[in-house]
Amino acid sequence: MSEEELPLARPVIGTREEQLVLEALRSGRLSLGPRLEAFERAFAARVGARCASAVLSGTAALHLALRAIGVGEGDEVVTTPFSFVASANVAVYERARPVFADIDPITLNLDPEAAAAAVTERTAALLPVHVFGYPADMQALERLGVPIVEDGCEALGAAYADGGPVGGRGHPTAFGFYANKQITTGEGGVLTTSDPAVKERVDSERNQGRAPDMDWLDHDRLGFNYRLSDVACALGIAQLERLEELLGGRARVATLYREALAGIDGLELPCPDRGEARRGWFVFVVQLPRGVDRDRTVLALGELGIPSKPYFPAVHLLSYYRERFGHREGEFPVCEAVASRSIALPFFPEMTDGQVAQVAEALESVLSRARAGAGRSR
Ligand SMILES: Cc1ncc(COP(=O)(O)O)c(C=O)c1O
């Protein structure tokens, strides 16, 4: 990569990460070693959870969470269509049906009223996603009286409306550590829970269905290989040590963006924190002014050296979901309108003031050209 090329995301990896990973490599304990438990303990403490289980990905954490609360064939899981595809896929893994409900136009999270309307006698779980690191309205969702699995894959460092950290509410909550996340282990995830029985089942199922006291190669349930290596856990421990610095860097960049983009007519920025709720900054997603062609904007930004991505496409309109479940446009109008206008801009903790200004100027010029073009064609 040349010096001037601006990435969409970039992890911060320093000498502490190198040191702990090297120690793990030299220890000879590359999997199921002491770093697994150390990472789990540190993570649980950070989010105020009783238990944590480290697994191979955020998707694996969500999958095992649904299994742990008993979701199975023929069940329904009420969730948001405005998410990364994994939050719906995990229901399909268990031959359950993801039932989508529309989103709140401000927070972009599952709308509790729409979720309530989607609950039936077949609903086995609610699966709210804390989209772009902003906490879903958990108090309203909890009032529906349905077991909950939280997708906190984008929300490490976020706080709920009552000020408590996301992941510490007791429901099984999944976090993900892909390279664009608040902390990374390359690939990886954690499931937090207040229930030791959930942890016991998850720990067994991530390890091919083996109970901790069982002999090698004795398995008492169906399991998977969802283990996270000790090398990845060593990276996770070092990243967790600097979480506040990483979150602070992202919050700083978000403030710069807000200032730089404030004057662009019709552009909608991520909602500000309300009450005690805190966003755990993950991405900076803007909604383009109405009537602007999203895909052309992405291309035009790319020509100016600014990477951006449509983010998210609505899950129910992905080709697999259309074909498998017969979804069509118009079912979830708020989600579809938001998805058609949303792009993620470059965003990472070490982004400089100059880089933010470069993105803002490029976006401003692309949008004013689009407006001029629209004016001419009228
Ligand atoms: C909302 C959401 N859910 C689930 C996942 C899945 O996490 P992973 O990629 O670690 O499997 C992601 C990751 O990008 C995500 O953003």
Image (tube, helix red, strand yellow):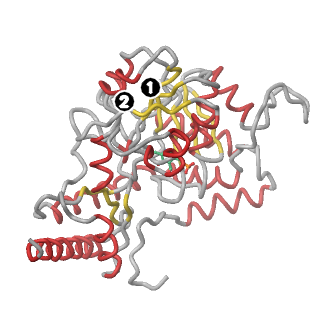
Give the residue type at disc 2.
Answer: Gly
215 relative to 225 in the view: left or right: right
Read off the residue under disc 2.
164
Sequence-earlier tag: 2 or 1: 2
Q: Residue at x 59, y 30 (%)?
A: 65
208 relative to 307 in the view: left or right: right
Residue 39: image quadrant is: top right
Residue 166's place in the image compared with 72, above or below, is below
Where residue 20 appears, x then y in whole percent? 64, 58
**Which marked residue is nearer to the observer: mark 2 or mark 1?**
1
Q: Residue at x 70, y 43 (%)?
A: 226
Give the residue type at disc 1.
Answer: Arg
Q: Which mark is residue 81?
A: none
Residue 142's place in the image compared with 301, above or below, is above
- Mark 2 Cα-neighbour bin, 10 Å: few <14, some 14–19, many ≥20: some
Placement of the C terminus among the 4 image quadrants: bottom left
Near-viewer residue (70 or 261): 70
Read off the residue under disc 1.
169
Q: Secondary structure at mark 1?
A: loop
Residue 59: image quadrant is: top right
Residue 171's place in the image compared with 309, above or below, is above
In three-dimensional space, the C-alpha distance between marks 2 and 1, rounded to whole angstroms, equals 8 Å
Where residue 70 appears, x then y in whole percent? 62, 21
